[in-house]
Amino acid sequence: MGIKRIHLQFLLIFSLFVSTPVFAQNFFNTDYDPEKSYILLTHPTVENIERIRYLIDNRILYVGETEFIGIYFYAERYDYSETIRYIRDNNLEKFHLQRLTGTLTLDNIFEPNDFTNNFDIMFSQSKGLILFGGPDIQPEAYGEVKNLSEVTDPQRHLMELSLVFHLLGSNKNPNFTPFLERNPKYFILGICLGMQTMNVATGGTMIQDIPTELYDAHTPQEIVQLDRDNIHRNYWQEIFDNPQLMPVNFHPLRLEIGSFFEKEVHWNKSNISPKVLSAHHQAVEDLNSCWEVTARSMDGKVIEAIHHKKYPNVFGVQFHPEVTALYEDMEEYKFSPRDVPQTYHQIIGRDGVKFEKLFWKRVSRAIN
């Protein structure tokens, strides 16, 4: 099917799903240019767009002339009107929005549904996807009962899970042929929740709360007594009301020998475990066999990064390489009340910055 025909089909499909078209939210209906290349962004908040802009402007991420399309489900709880104003007021000609509508339930996200044709066309007309962080996935999506999860935006997860299912396939529906079979070099990066979404969409399960399930620590007071390398967000701020306490933690990674970070990110300092920014309380439990584990926490209990065995440009990280404060000195924070305040940039140090930049170089190669 030719590009023009695909474009026309997309217009027809979206005209069915969007009852009240809003110009700023329907890029494929209004401004899509088949001569350009695009990367899709889930959860296109102002903060996420600012982070992408920072990485590009500071030559950490290289995308050439590639533009970005923020995609989101109309039923998400987040109000994207602020994003619309931000793009408009800053004349961001390379950032666009596409609002998706339709019906999704836990019963149809792992099969063809209202979104299938739109997902297919977006895949055909883009070169990659970045899945950003966010709140917990509803455990029912991976066959568990909600007990330790904090689910605040279930509709967002339904759309993102179904999107990744269509792209990568899943043992939930082994007869479905994933879209990447048509373009195995398509790029997908999952960050924090994004990596968890990649895991659940392909049939994996989640640890609903790391401190409780892995360390038998049930209260903030118990959690902060753990080794700091085993704490994946900062629980001190739940004990003391101090704005200088950071909401995150920094801990080193145990990179798997001979895997993605050594061979493709080109991190060759095998004697140094780089520090990364961590902000989560859940973790990957069971993985589909399509994934290889590329990094773990220092004690080996938490999976910190994965790489698809078949599709070379599909990988996820549990940590946050997109946070701008990693790359230059900004505000000073501390982890515990007794710590000396430091910037995030100082905490990860020269080796940490080098590691993050090498990672973004690998992302850049996947995009270009």
Image: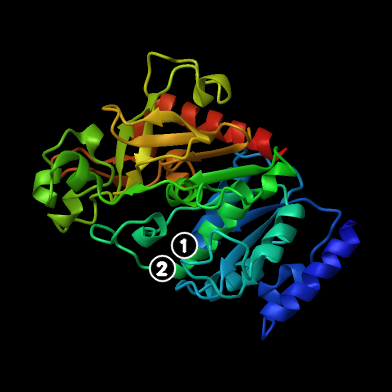
Decide: few, some or many residues near mark 1? Use Cα within 10 Å; few <14, some 14-19, many ≥20: many
Q: CA–CA distance between discs 2 and 1?
A: 7 Å
Q: Hey, what amino acid is under mark 1?
A: His
Q: In the visual, does 36 lie left or right of 187?
A: right
Pick the quarter of the image with the N terminus.
bottom right
Residue 95 position (above or below residue 77):
above
Evaluate if marks 2 and 1 touch, with contact meaning CB atoms under 8 Å apart.
yes
Q: Nearer the viewer, residue 50 or 189?
A: 189
* Mark count: 2
Visible residue check, residue 282: yes
Q: Nearer the viewer, residue 330 or 32?
A: 32
Q: In the visual, does 36 lie left or right of 164?
A: right
Query: Picture coordinates of residue 194 (x, y %)?
Result: 48, 50
Q: Name the residue beneath numbered marker 1.
A: 157
Image quarter for residue 33? Answer: bottom right
Residue displayed at 89% across by 64% down: 5
Query: Picture coordinates of residue 165 (x, y %)?
Result: 57, 53
Query: Picture coordinates of residue 256 (x, y %)?
Result: 42, 22
Residue displayed at 53% across by 63% down: 109
Q: Name the residue beneath numbered marker 2.
A: 153
Residue 153 position (above or below residue 301):
below
Residue that lies at the very extreme toward the front in this rendered image: 175
